[in-house]
């Protein structure tokens, strides 16, 4: 799945970003959420064979506030057989300080549509969190790479 900046956007490069998750697959070598930030679309973080459960979350934290327009979760990566590892229902929330959260636009979540948080208008945030709202088995929720987009600077 090709995920690219929209017109007027640039892709930010991870620098000191941290990720965490409420749950991870055990015994599959995919426990570490940092696999979603390693730049390798062949690796992934996943919830595993128990499937998707409401309340399961994945969170990205920046060391300092970043101006963000969109955060995209690539559930397919380099392997076409992960096409169904998308969240069946989710909310996207952002925070400036990590204590209070504001819900933002949540789009995608389909075989060829990655889940995304859309900030319209773009704004400076410190954290973004995706939380599942639907139960689904047998497909897992996988994230091969997290991509963060920002508005392109104007000259």
Image (cartoon, grey):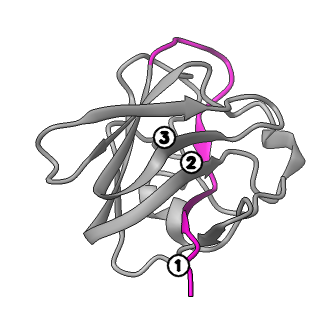
- Callout 2 touching callout 1 (CB < 8 Å): no
For the record, the magenta segment spans 133-155
In the image, farthest residue toward the bottom = 155
| CA–CA distance in space, label 2 to label 1 | 27 Å
| CA–CA distance in space, label 3 to label 1 | 26 Å
Q: Could you say whether the residue bearing mark 2 is in a helix, strand or loop? A: loop
| Quarter where residue 153 is shown | bottom right
Q: Which residue is mark 1?
A: 13
Confirm whether the magenta stretch covers residue 103.
no
Picture coordinates of residue 62, whole percent (x, y): 31, 67
> What is the crowding at mark 2: few (fewer than 14 residues within 10 Å), some, or many (at least 20)?
few
Picture coordinates of residue 25, whole percent (x, y): 48, 40
Confirm whether the magenta stretch covers residue 142.
yes
Mark nearer the viewer, 2 or 1: 1
Q: Is residue 41 above or below residue 85?
A: below
Q: Main secondary structure of the magenta part?
A: loop
Q: Which residue is mark 2?
A: 28
Q: Residue at x 67, y 32 (%)?
A: 108
């Amino acid at each position: 799945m090709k995920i690219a900046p929209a017109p007027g956007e640039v892709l930010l490069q991870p620098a000191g970003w941290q990720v965490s998750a409420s749950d991870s697959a055990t015994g599959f070598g995919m426990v570490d959420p940092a696999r979603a930030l390693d730049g390798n679309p062949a690796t992934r973080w996943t919830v595993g064979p128990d499937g998707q459960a409401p309340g399961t979350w994945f969170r990205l934290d920046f060391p300092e506030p970043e101006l963000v327009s969109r955060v995209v979760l690539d559930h397919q990566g380099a392997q076409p057989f992960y096409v169904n590892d998308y969240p069946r229902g989710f909310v996207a929330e952002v925070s400036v300080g990590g204590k209070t959260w504001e819900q933002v636009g949540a789009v995608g979540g389909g075989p060829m549509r990655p889940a995304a948080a859309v900030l319209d208008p773009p704004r400076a945030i410190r954290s973004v969190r995706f939380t599942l709202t639907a139960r689904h088995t047998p497909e897992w929720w996988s994230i091969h790479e997290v991509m963060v987009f920002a508005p392109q600077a104007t000259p």
